[in-house]
Amino acid sequence: MASAVTFGEAMLRLSPPGGLRLEQVRALETWPAGAELNVAVGLARLGTPAAWVSVLPHGPLGELVLAHARSHGVDVGGVTRAEGRLGLYFVEHGRPPLPSRALYDRAGSAFTALDPATLDWPALLSGASALHVTGITAALGEACERAVADALSAARAAGCHTSYDLNLRTLLGPPEGWRRRLESVASTVGTLLLSLDDAAAVLGAGGEPEQVAARVRHELGIERVLVSRRLPAQGGMRREVAAADDGGTRTVSSPAFAGDEPIGAGDAFAAGFLHGLLTSGADRGLKLGAAMAAVKQAVPGDAPVIGPDDLELALAGDARMRR
């Protein structure tokens, strides 16, 4: 029985090694990827039973993703198989002044051909305490948008906590569409997660993170809003997260980090936050989420391959070599 359920598409990420550009590459590193899958992995590794609902294609690439999820303890009983393909995306890691960039090759995937009517959400959510989705899934087409809305409604009816990570991807459509989709499900969202930049681009909400969190919460009528940003810190960078809910507004900061893998940090935060929320409350969730996002910067690939001991060491500021 899963305590948390996530729903979304998986892809395969392909990255040139050693900072090479795609035009130069002769071999690619491969990593299973996908925001909701990453969150399920993070939750399971922290000790919260997690299930992932998705559609994967028949064949070896689908098997690769399933093996990845299972290896981290994720329940894949809600994953169905279908004809079609697995979406791909390519990531070039850049260093200033050259930015990193992503190239999607995901059209026509097995996931985007799903039929929302085949998803039995009361059964899929049986025994769950939380459901996590993202704006990415809702942006993949009308069927996916409806499936996200159905999942949130069913979770709300079942008394599950619901979380929605906005996760703006301009390569999947303009900000106006992300705003419309968020507003259409806002009444069924318990916690909204978004970056300060996405709040400005999608909702026109500018200012300091605590102000933005309070404003978005008021305008959308959502129980809890979490707004994050990255700031310079001694030793590298830190992640700052502002929260607005019935407990007022407050801000937590992550330990400083200097890692080279920002992809998946937001998913790591979501996993840490939800684990803390379900076990000890929102304030503990904020601390764990911030620490999880910081540690993820040093972990290659999309998934937060991180355990509870890693978080406690990060919170204690202890990065000594263990022998």
Image (cartoon, grey):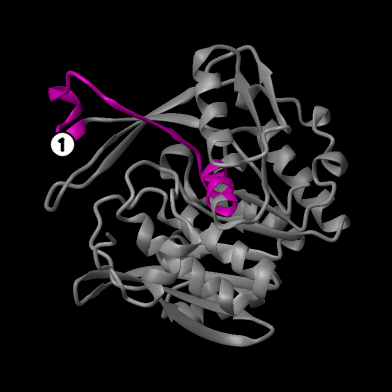
Q: Is residue 219 visible?
A: no
In the image: residue 149, left or right of residue 21: right
Which of 138 and 265 lies nearest the eye of the viewer? Answer: 265
Span of residues in magenta: 17-44
Rendering coords of residue 315 (x, y %): 40, 75
Q: Residue at x 31, y 73 (%)?
A: 318
Q: How many marks?
A: 1
The image shows residue 314 at horizontal and vertical percentages of 37, 70
For this orientation, the residue located farthest to the bottom is 248
Residue at position x 55%, y 20% in the image: 63
Residue 241 or 70: which is nearer the viewer?
70
| Residue at x 51% of width, y 32% of height | 68
Q: Nearer the viewer, residue 74 or 226?
A: 74
Q: Is 64 within the magenta?
A: no
Q: Is residue 100 left or right of residue 3?
A: left
For disc 1, the marked residue is 18
Q: Nearer the viewer, residue 210 or 155?
A: 155
| Residue 218 sits in quarter | bottom right
Q: What amino acid does circle 1 point to? A: Gly
Position of residue 131 measured from the top left corner of the image (x, y, whole percent): 71, 53
Quick check: 16 above or below 318? above
Q: Classify residue 229 by image quadrant.
A: bottom left
Residue occupying the far front of the picture = 323
